[in-house]
Image (cartoon, grey):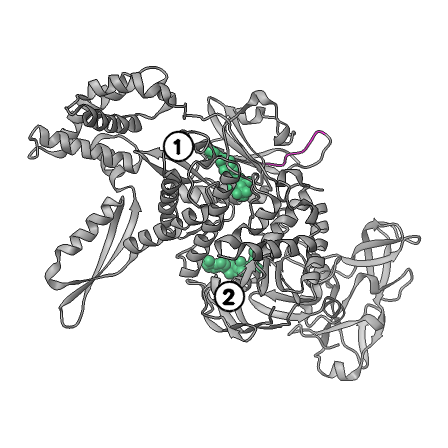
Amino acid sequence: MATVKFEGATRIYPGNDHPSVDKLDIDIADGEFLVVVGPSGCGKSTALRMLAGLEEVNEGRIWIGDRDVTNLSPKDRDVAMVFQNYALYPHMSVADNMGFALKIAGVEKSEIRKRVEEAAKILDLEPYLERKPKALSGGQRQRVAMGRAIVRSPQVFLMDEPLSNLDAKLRVQTRTQIASLQRRLGVTTVYVTHDQVEAMTMGDRIALLKDGLLQQVASPREMYDRPANVFVAGFIGSPAMNLITVPVTEDGVKFGSHKVEVERGVLSRAGSHVIVGVRPEDVQVRTEDDGLEIEVDVVEELGADAYVYGRPVAKEITLEGSEEGGERPFIARVDGRNVPEKGQHIYVFPNAEHLHVFHQETGERLA
Amino acid sequence: MALEITAARPDPALLDLPWSTPLEEWPEDLLAAFPRGISRHIVRFVKISGRVVAIKEIKTDIARREYEMLRNLRRLGLPAVEPWAVVAGRVTPAGDPIDGCLITRHLQFSLPYRALYSQSLRRGTASRLIDALAVLLVRLHLAGFWWGDVSLSNTLFRRDAGAFAAYLVDAETGELREQLSDGQREHDLDIARVNIAGELMDLEAGGLLQEDRDPVEVSERIMTRYRELWQELTGTEIVDTGERWRVDERVRRLNDLGFDVGELEMTTDIGGTSIQIHPKVVDAGHNSRRLLRLTGLDVRENQARRLLNDLDAYRSYFGRQADDEESVAFDWLREIYEPLTRTVPPELPRKIEPAEFFHELLEHRWYLSERHQRDFSLEEVKADYLTHVLPTKPDEKDVLGVDTVEMPVIASED
Ligand SMILES: Nc1ncnc2c1ncn2[C@@H]1O[C@H](COP(=O)(O)OP(=O)(O)OP(=O)(O)O)[C@@H](O)[C@H]1O
Ligand SMILES: Nc1ncnc2c1ncn2[C@@H]1O[C@H](COP(=O)(O)OP(=O)(O)OP(=O)(O)O)[C@@H](O)[C@H]1O
Ligand SMILES: [Mg+2]
Ligand SMILES: [Mg+2]
């Protein structure tokens, strides 16, 4: 087992002028489950492959434990890529399917047996060791494949979108399995996904990348409660946080007709406007004029709660993260027994305790 | 959602297939029971418009990616199955979505390794399969293809003058790069090693491996063969200024291996006493291209080498070294090759391709001459071959099903 450290690690692909991973600094603790997340093309896979030794590090260093592995070949790093299209061999027993690769590595028979049995215990496969894979269920077969990586007992597990092949239901099931397995094994793991829900539910900590740059690395809770900038705020959480540029006043910000108090120290670091973030569950909804006027477009009933999707009536106000041609809606969670109707106008303002304030230009968190 | 078929040349007959049914449940009468390698996805062979296609059920975006990748590989002249179509937007009658399909053309006369092992085999088959895979892997790597899932199952084999030629069949995990780093190549090689060992151990466990050599030991061959070949094709060599002939020799060695040399970089040291040579290999198929140019025959590399040797023998036998090469080739084709391969019993085309048949005749002639200590004409050889050898051969055009295995690891539930 080992710690992992990215130290200013940079990768520029030949022919590109921008780094795909740019001065990445992350310290991963021994036994930690770190999820690297971000939109397509942000450099997740590249970062993982740099750690695996499959992509050259142009600048900076990578450490596993106290070994500088920057220039080591993949073989010498003692890391295992999990789930890389493992085949199951029909004539071989489950035990042999799990252990055969150790035979190639020259591991003693008795040692192979020992490691296979240990892995089988953790994977709940003990009763099946002498069976053929055909006799197993789909989920058990998946665990056999995992077993192949486990018996190698590497210092670090690496996984790149291992669930992308699965349908939605099995994905949820398998992600819980992987997370609990990782905790039982206690092996340092780096896991890549583009899915923030997966990141939030699996990781001890999350590293969020955008354009090759690390935006924030923190626990899921911290990411959710204290996003470091507007990008993190908009990426983490589903439905997404509402982000709106609003004018700054003497002692707060104006949210439509509603004034929200904000600490002066915070405001002194801002210009004339700030970006305010409010999660759907932290939105106060009124029917009379108090706050930002919103026209309701869609109501999604979820039983106890409902989500209201609407847009500011004042045309000049748009939500951050809106792309050309696709406005982001304003989203509020409301009591399911008291739901506005489509077309109705409502007034919204943030709950002052759960207010996120970001600098208008830099997007950095102010409070 | 409507059914959506992407294909370079769409065949309307595709629309008649039961797309709203999961592939696993397609009616038998549509299917051709050819053998397949081990796979995690459902794969079926289907007869359509007089040809056979392989259909793989897989997530639509992955199907599209693999389709494009196979097209790119073929554009680069690399041996891979031919992609034909992607089918997306499938739904069951109840409205539930089903995974998409990648359709490739069935590679005729191709043999998955498991089918080979169900025949009685010559000794050393595993080694020859691995040699063919090593050539394939080197070619792919030279072109910048990072496979990611190298295995016997993901390769198809065709007979090639006693050896095998390998074709890529599964490009799902592949990536095309400008160039591969040593670490990336080693990664592929490592995957190949483990997969081959696993595949051979599986045959052993199933009692199908007729050789008694240790799979682990046999699998090591992929490393040594690959590295030897890579070194020969890309390595820098230092020769004495006085030994220039060694430059030619290097080129000839590469040609013999079936590769053409695009450029040869030569640098002399400061004192001018030695030359450093570094070849830039363009592609395999040196002999098959040459034979194609001379005769119009489109055959595999070793077969071409064999045919060219016979052409050379013909030429010197008739003392025609001074004649121009094309006209000798034309006469050889008309007088020797075509008469032998054209008039054949009707079952022959199902069992063996013409060029491989010709190769076997040459082999058989050698065997007969050894045994009877005299020369045989090719007509005599052919008669003997048709009576004694051909009847013992299995049909290989579209080999029928044996030991086909599907092992969905990730696509099914508890
Ligand atoms: N071989 C390559 N050559 C040039 N550029 C590359 C190469 N591989 C990746 N890139 C670029 O580097 C950036 C990061 O790619 P990477 O695959 O690491 O992103 P990712 O976050 O894993 O994306 P995805 O979720 O789509 O897999 C992208 O802009 C991509 O276009
Ligand atoms: N065009 C083709 N011609 C002949 N055989 C084919 C063709 N396409 C597929 N096959 C057979 O089907 C088998 C499975 O195909 P393929 O390897 O693409 O499936 P897969 O599920 O992606 O495999 P894996 O588990 O390695 O990811 C191959 O091993 C091969 O024997
Ligand atoms: Mg395959
Ligand atoms: Mg595949």
Q: Which residues are magenta?
A: B87-93
The one nearer the camera, B272 or B20, is B272
- Give the answer, above or below, for where B367 lies relative to A353: above
Three-letter amino acid code at the position of disc 2? Arg
Q: Residue at x 62, y 50 (%)?
A: A164
Measured as percent of width and height from the top left, residue B130 is found at 39, 44
Q: Chain of mark 2?
A: A
Residue that label 1 marks: B121
| Predominant SS along the magenta part | loop
Whether B177 is among the magenta residues is: no
Q: Can the viewer see residue B44 in this picture?
A: yes
The one nearer the camera, B154 or A340, is B154
Residue that label 2 marks: A77
Measured as percent of width and height from the top left, residue B310 is found at 18, 31
The one nearer the camera, A124 or A57, is A124
Check disc 2 and report its element: helix, strand or loop: helix
